[in-house]
Each structure stands twice: as structure tokens, then as C-alpha cells.
Image (tube, rainbow, N blue to C red):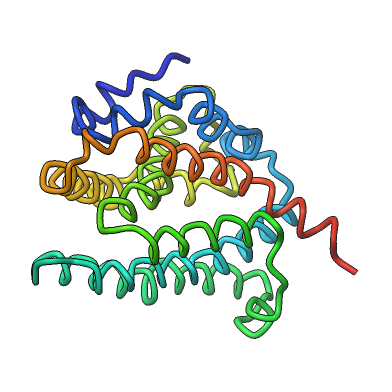
Amino acid sequence: MSFDIAVAMPFIGNTLCGALRENCEPDWDAYVGHRFVSELAAGTLPKPEFLAWMIQDYLYLVHYTRAYALLVYKSTTLDAMSSAAAIVHGLLNGEMSLHRQMLAAEGINAAQIVRTSETLETLAYGRYILDRAQAGDELDLVVTLSACLAGYGEIGLRLAADPATKLHANPYRDWIETYSGPAYIGLVKQGLARMEDLSQTHGGRARFPLLLAHFRQAVRLEAAFWNAGRTALATEF
């Protein structure tokens, strides 16, 4: 099925995010069209792989939250600080809490999660965003984090719009509906609007080649991260 980004996510339009996505299209397509995503849509992803991936995603979110905490520090206005702080609160008490609840329902408790070793995919991606959080300014960091934010929104909308996606009796239906739902898409819209504002005030167009390099690297790491569950299962003793 052909997916029209202009129709599904019109708020990207003529923005920095739209230009970044367009200029790394092969890497972006490998990310949003990954085997893991296709198997989620079909409901055929092996449950042990999904659970192992969820654990790695939780460990990654620890680093992602730390990066957003640094964004509070780097923000230059109180409104921006408040926005970043709200995201930190949401990650700690919302998304990470949801991961713990989902894993607990499968008999995996919080102590088991934090004792789990990070895969190479988790190590690489987590340390990359922390490096950008420390080395760059607000715009550098928001661009790097937007690969995850915008990508999951696009994936959710792609799967929801595709008639081939199985929803009935799909064990991953909640995942699909979370990332295609209005609450998450609203966060994407808000986050990308902030990135566009920062692009205007921090010379985004003039810095485009370097921002593209950071964005492309994050996209590649996102694509590799889909394999974190398989890697975790393969390295269990």
C-alpha cells in the first residue's frame, strides 16, 4: 500500500523534519519498513522476541529520559524548560511505567529488567543520544531525538492505514493503536513544532548538512534497534 506522508502527517510539510526525512530516504525506509514492524502488523512476531525487545526498549528509555533531562538544562526559556521537564515526567511515569506493567503481566518484574544486560544495539543508540545531549545545543539534541519521535508516529499511522495490517486477535494491537492514536500523534506534532521553532532561532537551514548527519545516524541506530530482541535472545546463557 502506498503511504502518503503529506496526507497522514500534514504538519511535517515544508519543515526541517520533512527535509531531514526526505534527504535520508533509504535509511528512513529501512527503519519504518523493518522486518520487526511488518511482523508486528501481521501479528506473527514471536512473543519471546517482542518481550526481549521491550526490555531493551525500557533500558534505552532510561538514556532517552536522561537526554531530555539535559534538554531542560540547555533550554533558554522557562517555557522550553517546562516543556522538556513535562516530557521527562511523562517518560518516567507514563511510558516507562507502561513498559513495566506490560512486562509484569508476562511475569517479568522490575528487578529482572534492570539486571538485564544491554545489547550492542542498546549500548550504541543510548550512548549516541547522550553524546549529542552533552555535546550539542538544543537544536542538535531535538533533531537527534526526533528520529524516534517522528518515526514511531509514522510507523503507527502506516500500520493503521494499511488494510493488510491485522488488528483482530493481533497480540500487538495495543502497540499499533498507541502509536497511531491521537495522543501520541499530538505529541509528535508538538515536538516537531518545537524543532521547527528552534530551527528558525538557531540557524537550522545554515546547519543543515551537520544536522542531517546527526539525524541519519539516529535513523540508522533506530533501524538496528529493532534487532535488539533477537540479539538479547541469542546471547542469553
Name the residue: 24% across, 68% down.
Answer: 74
Name the residue: 66% across, 69% down.
Answer: 106
Identity of the residue furthest to the top in this view: 2
Going by the image, does 9 lie left or right of 202?
right
Residue 129 image position (x, y, % from top left)? 46, 58
Count of residue discs:
0
In the depicted structure, whether residue 59 falls above or below residue 145: below
In front here: 34 or 14?
14
In front here: 101 or 215?
215
Name the residue: 55% across, 29% down.
Answer: 33
Q: Residue 48's image quarter?
A: bottom right
Going by the image, does 207 lie left or right of 115?
left
Residue 112 image position (x, y, % from top left)? 69, 80
In the depicted structure, whether residue 82 falls above or below residue 32: below
- Which quadrant is home to the C terminus? bottom right
In the depicted structure, whether residue 44 falls above or below residue 124: above
In the depicted structure, whether residue 160 falls above or below residue 194: above
Going by the image, does 124 lie left or right of 145?
right
In front here: 136 or 120?
136
Residue 159 image position (x, y, % from top left)? 46, 32
Identity of the residue furthest to the bottom in this view: 111
Name the residue: 69% across, 47% down.
Answer: 227
Q: Residue 111's image quarter?
A: bottom right
